[in-house]
Image (cartoon, rainbow, N blue to C red):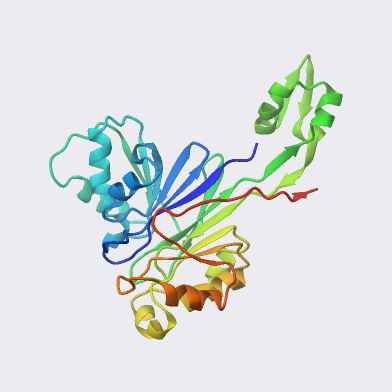
Amino acid sequence: MASNIKITFIGTGGSWPTPGRGLPCVAVQIDDITNLFDCGEGTQKQLMKSKVSFMSIDNIFITHFHGDHFLGILGMIQSMSFNGREKPLNIFCPRGGIRILSNALNAGYFRLKFEILVTELDWSETYDFDKFTVSTHKNDHTIPAMSYRIQEKDLIRIDKEKANELGIPPRRLEELRKKGSITHDGKTYTIEQISGGIRKGRSIVYTGDTRPMESMKEFAKNADVLIHETTTDSTLEPKVNEFGHSSSRQAAEIARDSGVKRFYLFHYSPRYENVDSLIKEALGICSVSVASKEFMEYEIPVDQDISG
């Protein structure tokens, strides 16, 4: 059975919060697994205004250690502890993160009631999370920073007629899909015997902060969703690039050339009370551009195309 994949934009701004916009945080829910990408200051309060419970979070992926991308972890962890969390919290980040987070999490006095597991990730690697994988990409920013690609695993479509002909009971079909083979009534059956083709897994690319990169086009190739930072419009490109960021024009060109199905503008400079100029510029280049907003949700549809 295909997973349910939902994206919720928790905070879409950058640098510092504004009255109408929080700092970077995107929730990606895959069935019962909740992943956060970045966790800027005030994230826990933003989550309380959304449909995503901060108590349900399983994994946090930090792109880099500028304060607007990770300082929200500190208060949120204390609130989790106050509210009786017991399950471990996983935090994934670039190299150097264990030292930074260890120092930060020891600030102040509070009693931690659950385990925090911090894992430093390498560039250009892929990590297995059972239902999905997460790949990393080295960004062009002013400090070490990485993008993430979350990839649902390909799904073998089960041909129920073939299963019926072989006498495999319906209640064991998902077990067969997961294990690859089962034994029933003394006979062993393989998934290949009842395969009706492959449904390609869905994918989301979240960049964090970066200057425009040609290599990002390959990293984001054919993704269902690309969330690429768009700090300013193109009139400020020299300055925004100097500080390690991208314009809406530059990000839209990456989205267009990588063939993504949907491109979300994200990480807006506080100078923009509205982002009309950014989305107008992006749409002129990439027709699938969407301006992300606080608490906007998007469920990625299942691709109905089945390959043989």
158 over 20 or under it: above or below: above
From the viewer's perspective, tell me whether residue 61 is left or right of residue 106: right
In the displayed image of the protein, which residue is found farthest to the left? Answer: 109
Q: Is residue 250 visible?
A: no
Q: Position of residue 156 (x, y in %)?
A: 71, 40
- Quadrant in which residue 277 is drawn: bottom left
Q: Horizontally, is 273 left or right of 33 in the view?
A: left
Instruction: Tally the marks.
Output: 0
Residue at 35 percent across and 39 percent down: it is 89
| Front residue of this view, candidates 274 and 219 | 274
Q: Position of residue 220 (x, y in %)?
A: 56, 63
Question: Which quadrant of the figure contains the N terminus?
Answer: top right
Above-or-below relation of 240 to 181: below
Which residue is rendered at x = 75% and y = 33% of the image? 191
Left/right placement of residue 298 relative to residue 235 reads right
Residue at image location 26% in from the left, 54% down from the top: 100
Q: Residue furthest right?
A: 165
Quadrant of residue 186 within the rendered picture? top right
Q: Residue at x 56, y 40 (%)?
A: 131
x%, y% of residue 188? 78, 23
Work out whether residue 23 or residue 71 is closer to the camera in this orientation and state it.
23
Residue 70 in sight:
yes
Residue nearer the viewer, 249 or 126: 249
Q: Position of residue 27 (x, y in %)?
A: 43, 49
Q: Is residue 219 left or right of residue 241?
A: right
